[in-house]
Amino acid sequence: MRLIGTAGHIDHGKSTLVEALSGIHPSRLPEERARGMTIDLGYAHLDHPDGYRLGMVDVPGHEKLVKNMVAGATGFELALWVVDARESVMPQSLEHLQILDLLGVRSLIPVVTKAELASAEQLDAALHDVASLLARARVPTQPAHVVDSVSGRGIARLKEAIFASCGASPDGEDALPYLPVDRVFTLRGIGTVVTGTLVRGRLAEGGQVALAGGTWRVRSLHNHHERVGAIGAGHRVGVNVAGLAADAVRRGDTLVAPGHPYTGRFLNVRIRWVEGAPAEWKHGARLHFHAGCTEAECRLWGLEREGWAQLELREEAPFFPGQRFILRGTSPLATVGGGEVLDVAPGRPRRVLPAERAAYSLREGGEPSLAAYLAEAPAPVVELPALARRWMLPEAALRREAEESPKLRLGPGGGAGLLVWGADWEGELLKRLHDFVAGQPRGERLVPYARLGRELRGPASHLPALLRALLGREGTAFLRASVRLDGAGCVLYPGRVAFTPDEERVAGELLERLRAAGLRPARIREYGELHPRRPEVVERVAAKLRDQGRVVRVSPDLFLHADAADELREAPRRHGLDGVRAAEFGRALGLSRKYTIPYLEYLNQEGILRREGDLHYLA
């Protein structure tokens, strides 16, 4: 542990306690010193006897400044819960304790302050009230300390307890960096500086970070007024970001690694309500959502009795595995609950699906959850990398679970884009495909994947890769002879390829034109001039060339020469097109939207790219 923070009611002595422990007064604003009241987060540090430094965050205690308190408390490893011996537990003492509990602070030391000003009866009453409240809290609690920051009573013993609780290496340094921004300012000759607590990961000078919609270079790092070359999780840090304008970033933004995978607007969560909060909430209720320095209005959907629910934010935000959040009501403005983000891309907006609830319940108990999810899912097949990003879990862990489960099947092949499906569903899908094909007239025809997905009651987006894997199994000889998977759909009863002399002439001319056109061919109907009297012959010739493998159909009316198709399949990796939108893909290849959309759909069907929302990632 490296980050310590205060919590408690206004004017209960939090800032004075920090000064007594560290020798540094945490108030930095003139208004705070003039009014004797903490308004924003204050900072100090304490040197551990073992040679490393502990950061200290002082939070405001006023009820209207709870959002600032949540921003600071999100990074706490150890919390000092401060209670005035004369006043005992007050409203913000209770709310701050609830917030620390909901945020999952690892350890809490109750500190009863201003002991020299209180009578023996007041001190006993305060200690009794503190013990009664902590008995109902879930946060791990240490013995209470009685101190007086002015006289120094109890400060030395409190320091010893802090040092004993704080290890040198916090968890999360090997994770992706995640830094909620709580201050932004400009220094002359230096540029824009953002500050915050590095909750996870590591930052290093010269590294790349993502912030305010762009990617930037870290020019320098500062920790407690000292420049450092690199810094790990649990520290306060100022990041000098090269090239970033100060007015482009604001408090509440989050500094992450470029391409941070865990972002979402609809979030499946597990909520725990505070004592006295309403037991039921109206579908679509509006609440205030606090996570790190992010404060946003959210809507509450699909609340289950067990606490599963979905939160809808106004805009997408980044999260990390195990992210905790706080919910506050709008009238009155008070903490009503909090919990953990479990899924950043749920299967359906405004509803937690039964399959998701089944998986989350098992995950909470540390049990395998993938098989339970697929058993309940409407279409029991998932893309493993996409599910790992949704659930903010290591893909390797899900892959291992799939390999060890007799109820699951893996395929096709390894790498990104790997599919997982239920073994029981596998036979049912093949039976549906067999019945569908056997019931069709025996003549070559193309069935688009969208229609085939409806016929088979399966996911059209995964059908090409899934069927390729299944058609290699034993007992599928009839299907292998009766279907051929094409870029645009499934070809039923592909016939023998033979050209009439007239078709041979058209085929030669069509191949030459397609070869010359490369990735910019005309629609197949526009080649009708090759046979003016019967334009339909050109489409028949194109279908036969496709059966020979000399051209590739990427959409119902768009064919590519085989060489151009190879070029298209190699283009994403050659150009480094990972996580791009359609417009960016088109610019990289010099293509208009006429080609970009069908090409992206083809590459996704082929398993070369995978689509998530508007973005297409390398598979």
Image (cartoon, rainbow, N blue to C red):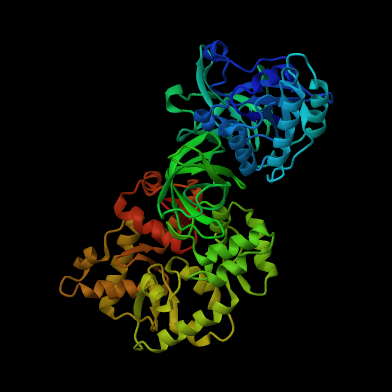
Q: Residue drawn at (39%, 47%), measured in percent from left and top?
A: 589
Q: Name above or below for residue 546 compared with residue 229.
A: below
Q: Residue drawn at (46%, 83%), measured in percent from left and top?
A: 432
Near-viewer residue (130 or 530) = 130
Q: At which x and y percent is residue 514?
A: 33, 61
Q: Is residue 232 visible?
A: yes
Q: At which x and y percent is residue 251?
A: 49, 28
Horizontally, is 346 left or right of 202 in the view? left
Q: Name above or below for residue 22 compared with residue 288.
A: above
Horizontally, is 530 left or right of 452 in the view? left
Horizontally, is 19 left or right of 612 in the view? right
Q: Is residue 1 visible?
A: no
Q: Name above or below for residue 593 compared with residue 26.
A: below
Q: Residue drawn at (57%, 61%), measured in percent from left and top?
A: 384
Kindly indicate the quadrant of the structure image that contains residue 363: bottom right
Q: As drawn, which residue projects farthest toward the left?
A: 533
